[in-house]
Image: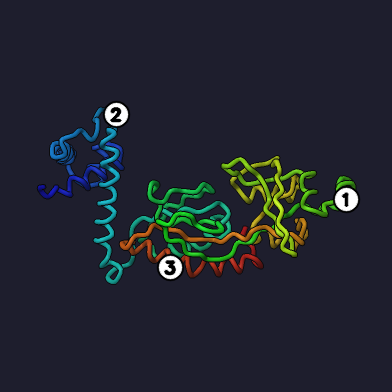
Amino acid sequence: MSVPDLTNYYIFARVAAAGSISAGARELNMPKSTVSRRLTDLEEAQGVRLLHRSTRGLKLTDVGQAFLVHCETMVAAAEAAQQVTQLVQETPRGEINLSSPYAISQSMLVTLLPEFMALYPEVKINLVVTNRPVNLIDEGIDIALRVRSHIEDSSLIARPLADAPATLVRSPDRGDVARIEHPLNHPLDLIKFPHLSLHFTSGRYSYELRSQQGDKLTVSYRPRLITDDLMVLREAAIEGLGIVSLPNYLCEQELHDGVLERVLPEWSLPVGIMHMVYPYRRGLLPAVRVLIDFLAERLPITARSSLTSPFR
């Protein structure tokens, strides 16, 4: 088998990412005619059509789409190899794709990322803020922050950073006559009250509660407000719209100020663990490595301090 021209693989990946031959040629700083000829050479060498060209741009064939995945892997490996020496010779540089839930982004990364980017001005960060579990490999995510009791995917490296306990809270409107008529003394009393919740793809909404004596109880509920934004849930709870489970770092100050109160304080929710997750790869780019080290050092400190100095 002859050695393939890897330059054509690289050009193909860059053109596919750019969306057109013209855009790809500008990004590569090459003549459009050269890029077009290189793509033709690649298709002839592979013996299949990889893309459809038109005046509107280009569209990958099914084979081209599958071929692109491997080309992108090759490009990433080449960039990692190229930057190995930069770890000792130059400041880390390049683009990092970072995924984070809304609450961590809005309460912690909002201060940490500007600090990191000031330290490494040649690093570009693409922050994807979502509560949806992302597929790191398929979506090209370098680092993901997650709050889970454990990480199921054994193909990923999961570094626990800090505990993330949660508390059931509500507005302390003690003048509410309904609260006198419907006291909340036991977990089963929760079914009498409105609730607020994050969106659960399973469609099953419940609290897993544990008493100080070790008793366990699962209580299902129907939320009246569902959102992926914990800040919205916190403000809705303050306005008296319902009971909600919030991470402690988002409600400690509100509890201290008396605008929220704990519900069933003798019962506790499962403690989540903040993880930093990244693919199991030996050739992590230097920029990714320094961000991993930075977050591993700073996020636990920020999470602990937020219990007394909440971020808004």
Note whether 105 is above or below 132 in the view shown: below
Q: Residue furthest top?
A: 55
Q: Quadrant of the C terminus?
A: bottom right
Kindly identify which residue carries mark 1. Answer: 175
Residue 253 pos. (x, y %): 70, 62
User: Residue at the spot x=46%, y=61% of the render?
Assistant: 158
What amino acid is at disc 3?
Answer: Asp
What amino acid is at disc 1?
Answer: Gly
Q: Which of the 4 quarters of the picture holds residue 300?
A: bottom right
User: Residue at the spot x=76%, y=56% of the render?
Assistant: 263
Kindly identify which residue carries mark 2. Answer: 56
Of badges 3 and 2, nearer the viewer stands: 3
Please tell me whether mark 2 sits on a helix, a strand or a loop: loop
Task: Classify residue 270 as left or right of residue 266.
Answer: left
Kindly identify which residue carries mark 3. Answer: 293
For label 3, the crowd category at 10 Å Cα-Cα, with few meaning under 14, some 14 to 19 and many 20 or more, is few
Task: Classify residue 33 as left or right of residue 225.
Answer: left
**Spatial distance from mark 3 to mark 2, Cα to Cα?**
44 Å
Q: Mark 3 or mark 1, which is nearer the start of the sequence?
A: 1
For label 2, the crowd category at 10 Å Cα-Cα, with few meaning under 14, some 14 to 19 and many 20 or more, is few
Q: Which of the 4 quarters of the picture holds residue 47?
A: top left
